[in-house]
Image (cartoon, grey):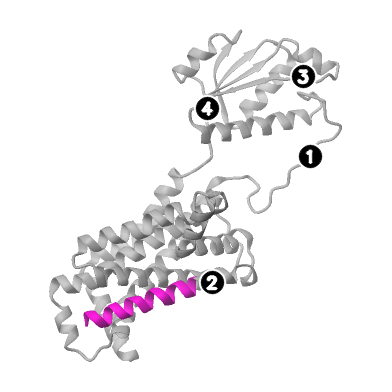
C-alpha cells in the first residue's frame, strides 16, 4: 500500500516538474497574494485630511492642534476663521475631518472649568469615520491627562493597557486570517484540477487497469500538494514576520501540526470536487465558490462571527477556516498551547475525515 501511494505521489511530482508553471504558481501564489493583500488590506487610516478652525488662537489651542498633527494620522489641509466654509470643503473632499476650537477654550482651561471642542467628520464611509473618531478621542484623552488638558471634569484618568497588539495595528489581526484564506483557496484549486486533468487526458482509464485502490490514489495525489502547501505556508509565515511584523509567539511545531490538518481538509475537499467535475473549468469554478467566499465572509477573517445573526453562526460551523483562523491567532499572536485551541484541532480532524471519506467513496465509483 505504501509503495503504491509513494509511486502515485512520485508520478504526480513528475507531472508537476514537467508542468513547471503550475508548480511555480502553487509555490509562489500564496506568497505573492500575501504581499499584495497584506499591504492593501488594512483597517488603519492615515493621512486624514484635517481642517482647523481655531477661534481661540492661544498657546493652549495651538498645542491641541499640534497634538493632532504630530500623531501621524492627520495632515492639515485648511486653516479657517469660522465654520461656514466647512460644508464646501467636505463636499469637494478637500478635508475628511475638521477640528473646531471655541474662542473661550483657553480661558476655560486656565480657570479649570469644563470646556468642549467640536470634531466634525465625513460619515459617508462609516468604517473610516469610526476609525478616525477613535483616533481623535485617543488624542483628546492624552491631552486631557496633560497639564494643559482640554477638559478637567474627571478626578482621575483610566490608563489603557493593550495586550498582544499594543499598537492596535490591523495587519496583526488580518494577516493570520489572510494566510488561512490564501491556503484554503490555493489548496482546493490545486487538487480539484488533479484528477480532472487525468480524465481530460484519458489517463484515468489506465489507472482503472492498475491494482491501485481508491484511497491509495487519493493519498498519492494529495501528498505532493500537501508538501507544496506546507512549503508555501512556511514562506508566507516568514514574510508575515519579516514584512508586516506579525509576531510568532507560539510553538512552531504546534503551528505546523495545525496547518497540516487544515491543508489536509482543503486538499480532501479539492479531490472531492475533482471526482464530481468533468472539466477543469467546472472544477475551477466549484473550487472558487466553495472556498473563497465562505473563507472570506464566514470564517471570522474580517467580520467577527459573534456579530453575525445566530442562524448564520451555525452555518459557519461547517467551514474549516473558522477553526484554523482561531487556532492560528491563538498560537501566533498569544503564544498559547493546545489546551486553549484543542477543540479547533479536533474540528479540523473531523472535517478532514469527513471530506476524505466522501472523496474516497466518489473515487471508488470513478475507478
Q: Which mark is residue 115?
A: 3
Callout 1: SS: loop
Q: Quadrant of the C terminus?
A: bottom left
Q: Residues within 10 Å of mark 1 (few under 14, many from 20)?
A: few
Which residues are the magenta region?
348-367
Q: Earlier in the sequence, mark 3 or mark 4?
A: 3
Mark 1 sits on what residue? 158
Q: Residue at x 35, y 62 (%)?
A: 186
Q: Residue at x 46, y 17 (%)?
A: 91
Callout 3: SS: loop
Q: Earlier in the sequence, mark 4 or mark 1?
A: 4
Q: Earlier in the sequence, mark 3 or mark 1?
A: 3
How far apart are the alpha carbons under marks 4 and 1? 28 Å
How far apart are the alpha carbons under marks 2 and 4? 42 Å
Q: Is residue 364 magenta?
A: yes
Between label 4 and label 1, give the one nearer the viewer: 4
Give the percent coordinates (x, y) of residue 237. 48, 60
Q: Residues within 10 Å of mark 3 (few under 14, many from 20)?
A: some
How far apart are the alpha carbons under marks 3 and 4? 25 Å
Q: Considering only vertical position in the picture, is 195 above or below 308? A: below
Q: Residue at x 69, y 20 (%)?
A: 117
Task: Specify whether residue 240 is in view.
Answer: no
Q: Is residue 287 left or right of residue 61?
A: left
Mark 2 sits on what residue? 345
Q: How many marks?
A: 4
Q: Considering only vertical position in the picture, is 108 above or below 281? A: above
Q: Earlier in the sequence, mark 1 or mark 2?
A: 1
Q: Earlier in the sequence, mark 2 or mark 3?
A: 3
Of helix, strand and loop, which mostly describes the magenta segment?
helix
Q: Is residue 84 magenta?
A: no
Mark 4 sits on what residue? 123
Amino acid at each position: 500500500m505504501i509503495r503504491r501511494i509513494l509511486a502515485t505521489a512520485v508520478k504526480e511530482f513528475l507531472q508537476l516538474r514537467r508542468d513547471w508553471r503550475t508548480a511555480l504558481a502553487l509555490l509562489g501564489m500564496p506568497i505573492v497574494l500575501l504581499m499584495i493583500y497584506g499591504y492593501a488590506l488594512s483597517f488603519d487610516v492615515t493621512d486624514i485630511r484635517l481642517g482647523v478652525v481655531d477661534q481661540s488662537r492661544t498657546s493652549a489651542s495651538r498645542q491641541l492642534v499640534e497634538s493632532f498633527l504630530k500623531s501621524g494620522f492627520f495632515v492639515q489641509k485648511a486653516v479657517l476663521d469660522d465654520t461656514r466654509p466647512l460644508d464646501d470643503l467636505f463636499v469637494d473632499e478637500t478635508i475628511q475631518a475638521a477640528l473646531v476650537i471655541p474662542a473661550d477654550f483657553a480661558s476655560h482651561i486656565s480657570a479649570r472649568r469644563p470646556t468642549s471642542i467640536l470634531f466634525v467628520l465625513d460619515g459617508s464611509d462609516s468604517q473610516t469615520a469610526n476609525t478616525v473618531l477613535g483616533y481623535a478621542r485617543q488624542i483628546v484623552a492624552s491631552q486631557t491627562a496633560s497639564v494643559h488638558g482640554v477638559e478637567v471634569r474627571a478626578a482621575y484618568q483610566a490608563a489603557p493597557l493593550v495586550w498582544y497588539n499594543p499598537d492596535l495595528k490591523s495587519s496583526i489581526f488580518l494577516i493570520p486570517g489572510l494566510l488561512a484564506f490564501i491556503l484554503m483557496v490555493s489548496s482546493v484549486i490545486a487538487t480539484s484540477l488533479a484528477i480532472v486533468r487525468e480524465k481530460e487526458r484519458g489517463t484515468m482509464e489506465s489507472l482503472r487497469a492498475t491494482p491501485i485502490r481508491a484511497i491509495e490514489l487519493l493519498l498519492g495525489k494529495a501528498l505532493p500538494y500537501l508538501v507544496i502547501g506546507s512549503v508555501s505556508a512556511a514562506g508566507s509565515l516568514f514574510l508575515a514576520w519579516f514584512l508586516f511584523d506579525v509576531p510568532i509567539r507560539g510553538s512552531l511545531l504546534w503551528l505546523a501540526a495545525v496547518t497540516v490538518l487544515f491543508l489536509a481538509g482543503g486538499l480532501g475537499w479539492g479531490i472531492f470536487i475533482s471526482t464530481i467535475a468533468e472539466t477543469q473549468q467546472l472544477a475551477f469554478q466549484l473550487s472558487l465558490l466553495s472556498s473563497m467566499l465562505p473563507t472570506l465572509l464566514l470564517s471570522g477573517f474580517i467580520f467577527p462571527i459573534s456579530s453575525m445573526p445566530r442562524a448564520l453562526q451555525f452555518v459557519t460551523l461547517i467551514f474549516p477556516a473558522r477553526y484554523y483562523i482561531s487556532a492560528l491567532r491563538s498560537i501566533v499572536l498569544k503564544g498559547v498551547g493546545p489546551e486553549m485551541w484543542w477543540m479547533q484541532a479536533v474540528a479540523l480532524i473531523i472535517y478532514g475525515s469527513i471530506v476524505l471519506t466522501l472523496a474516497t467513496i466518489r473515487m471508488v465509483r470513478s475507478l
